[in-house]
Image (cartoon, helix red, strand yellow):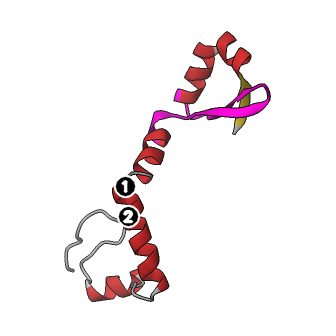
């Protein structure tokens, strides 16, 4: 991730925002130390959602289940439900 100082950001704000819209990301520095991050909105939304209470709770439950051996391998799920499409595109039809 590229770094940009506050003064440079002020001088080229429109250009930097256009770059961020195009997928670039920047660490904004203040007196040489990281102070903020500029990310495309899609990435920022993912970060916010990934840290909401519900998702944090689900992630902790999943990790605890994995640690306790209470998980199922994806291949085992495919054999148990042969019409399930693991690519996430809904159910496939039987042949």
Q: Quarter-wise, where is residue 76 in the image?
A: bottom left
Instruction: Point out the stretch of residues depicted in magenta.
Output: 21-42
Instruction: Quadrant for the N terminus, please.
Output: top right
Residue at image x 26%, y 83%?
Answer: 82
- The residue pinned by badge 2 equals 57
Residue at image x 24%, y 65%?
Answer: 90
* Side (left or right) of 13 relative to 90: right
Within-10-Å neighbours for mark 2: few <14, some 14–19, many 20+: few
What's the CA distance linking mark 1 and mark 2? 6 Å
Q: Position of residue 58 (x, y in %)?
A: 37, 66
- The residue nearer to you, when weighing 46 against 81, is 46
| Residue farthest toward the right in the current orientation of the protein | 32
Q: Which mark is on residue 53?
A: 1
Q: Position of residue 19 (x, y in %)?
A: 60, 25
In the image, residue 32 above or below residue 81? above
- Residue 39 covered by magenta stretch: yes
Q: Which mark is on residue 95?
A: none
Q: Quarter-wise, where is residue 27 in the image?
A: top right
- The residue nearer to you, when weighing 74 against 11, is 11
- The residue nearer to you, when weighing 8 against 23, is 8
Q: Are marks 1 and 2 in contact (CB under 8 Å)?
A: yes
| Residue farthest toward the top in the current orientation of the protein | 11
- Residue 18 covered by magenta stretch: no
**Dot 1: element:** helix
- The residue nearer to you, when weighing 78 against 12, is 12
Residue at image x 40%, y 80%?
Answer: 74
Q: Position of residue 79 (x, y in %)?
A: 32, 88
Residue at image x 39%, y 73%?
Answer: 61
């Amino acid at each position: 991730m590229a770094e940009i100082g506050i003064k440079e950001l002020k001088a080229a704000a429109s250009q930097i925002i256009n770059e961020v819209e195009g997928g670039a990301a920047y660490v904004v520095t203040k007196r040489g130390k990281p102070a903020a991050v500029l990310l495309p909105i899609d990435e920022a939304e993912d970060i916010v959602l990934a840290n909401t209470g519900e998702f944090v709770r689900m992630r902790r439950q999943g990790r605890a289940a994995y640690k306790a051996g209470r998980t199922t391998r994806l291949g085992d799920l495919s054999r148990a439900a042969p019409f399930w499409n693991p690519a996430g595109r809904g159910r496939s039809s039987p042949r």
